[in-house]
Image (cartoon, helix red, strand yellow):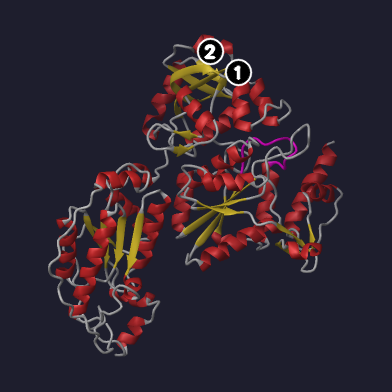
Amino acid sequence: MSGNKKQRTDLQRSTNVVYQAHHVSRTKRGQVVGTRAGFRGCVVWLTGLSGAGKTTIGFALEEYLVSHAIPSYSLDGDNIRHGLNKNLGFSTTDREENIRRIAEVAKLFADAGLVCITSFISPYTKDRAEARKILEAAGLPFFEVFVNAPLDVCESRDVKGLYKKARAGEIKGFTGIDSEYEKPEAPELVLKTGQVTVNECIQQLVGLLQEQCIVPASVMEEVKELFVPENKLDLAQAEAKTLPTLQITQLDMQWMQVLAEGWATPLKGFMREREFLQVLHFGTLLDGETINLSVPIVLPVSSENKESLDGCAAIALEYEGRKVAILRNPEFYEHRKEERCARQWGTTCAKHPHIKMVMESGDWLVGGDLEVMERIKWNDGLDQYRLTPTELKQKFKEMKADAIFAFQLRNPVHNGHALLMQDTKRRLLERGYKRPVLLLHPLGGWTKDDDVPLAWRMKQHAAVLEEGVLDPNSTIVAIFPSPMMYAGPTEVQWHCRARMIAGANFYIVGRDPAGMPHPETKKDIYEPTHGAKVLTMAPGLSSVEIIPFRVAAYNKAKKAMDFYDKERHSEFDFISGTRMRKLARDGDYPPDGFMAPKAWKVLTEYYVSLGKEN
């Protein structure tokens, strides 16, 4: 590739050496390296022209696998030439030696139990065949992947400016210009990077590794929806009319929407006793791989309902006079309310709003496989925002997002929140992501009486976007259908994991997430920093990176929200929720720069409307 003087690479072969076998078997090593059951050492060999996308895909695949607890390492061509192969040039002989060394190094990584990803032009068929021979002779799988982008596409990318130099004659022997690239004849996979996104390439690669039993099927993260297929809907509706009926509440209906749309994948319906006990005691589902699911998703029923329905093969669930679902093979078990509350909330205070609902609910729980008739609509003018995980993933794909950072909220957005979201986007861009997308995801299920209602919050969020505080071109506003539980660190795991199901790989966690003051002592029920700390340790959330909330306050000097600096404490004003609500009720304005003016106007309209109602 270079016209620089050739470096000396003719090395003598070693003699009088004998290979020493390891005492540790690959099976034993596979039990230690990672936690995903077994040895999975292999080499994924990415080959293609400069600019085809090998490095981008190699690092993205490495990130994806590691985030799913699959040990892997990406070897990049430029990086290797900074160290191991810095004495090699770009002659045919040196290129051959370059690939031989890489194959030997990749063999060591694979033998250690890692998925080793190599990103090298490796232009010659013979050299790639030799690399395959080295791996296969060691009994290790080798997957040749042709990263296929047309030359004009590669030239148009030309981040390093190498094609321009090659065309100008400044670089000699440049692959694709004055040195041939021999395309693979029978690669295990072809990635057409001029036509598909990086995320689509990763899914194809993970699919290949799954087919070859290198990674488990669960790594594909398929969303499990529970809707009746359209071609079977008439039969299901007719059957529901013949079944014994159970009336469900609005809260039950919200949980059913969560289940039906796949937010609680892999649950097949309301939890059976085995699943309930696993979640209550371990915060995870344990049948198969360990899956984080920290809150019980259950259907309470009265003793009378239990008496009349126990033994039925299926039950029709009815809401406001409509048969909305069928619960098959129902299983009834005791609803030990006090124990559930003590474990889920860490308190049994009857004045806690959600605990109050639990204590007033049925003495039995019923679990079973759920078949939901149709998409759940609330007809409140907001259904267009209720995007399912599958729909959100499609939106991210259409936006060509390479990073999705989610922000869960149940309150209006002020400029402190916006500052954190803006800063997160900036940091992601600095890390090399090209199209980070924000999922602004307000909770849309039940909330306590003194929280701002969903419809007003959505108006306020729209005003924030309208004023350009957040970039509407890189933001998706959608509604998360889950009810609020105010269960602190236990609940925040659920919030994070549900967004992970929808495709988020970064999650912003704030101060005292899902917390509230104790109804009697008025002190925080949960230590405000524990939510973020628990998320960084929680099992089963490895495919999402936690971004802790940086404390923001109003900077009086800047007249804007700013990250708090204790060295300049006197410059900051902490505007509490209580103070904000009083200002809004009184029709007053907060300091300039605290909240977008149009967004504040929405908030004042809401609090003024409360006064009129009273």
38 or 159, which is in the foreground?
Answer: 38
Classify residue 430 as left or right of residue 223: right
Which amino acid lies under the numbered mark 1 shown in the image of this protein? Answer: Gly
**Mark earlier in primary sequence (2, 1):** 2
209 or 237, which is in the foreground?
Answer: 209
What secondary structure predominates along the stretch shown in magenta? loop
Residue 427 in percent (x, y) is at: 55, 64
Mark carried by residue 310: none
Residue 179 in percent (x, y) is at: 21, 81
- Quadrant in the picture for residue 158: bottom left
- Quadrant in the picture for residue 129: bottom left
Dots 2 and 1: beta carbons under 8 Å? Answer: yes
Classify residue 227 as left or right of residue 338: left
Residue 217 in sight in this render: yes
Residue 190 in sight in this render: no
- Quadrant in the picture for residue 559: bottom right
Residue where numbered disc 2 is placed: 306
Q: Distance between the residues labelled 2 and 1?
A: 9 Å
432 or 410, which is in the foreground?
Answer: 432
Which amino acid lies under the numbered mark 2 shown in the image of this protein? Answer: Lys
Q: What stretch is highlighted in magenta?
A: 442-453
Mark carried by residue 362: 1
Tag 2, which secondary structure? helix
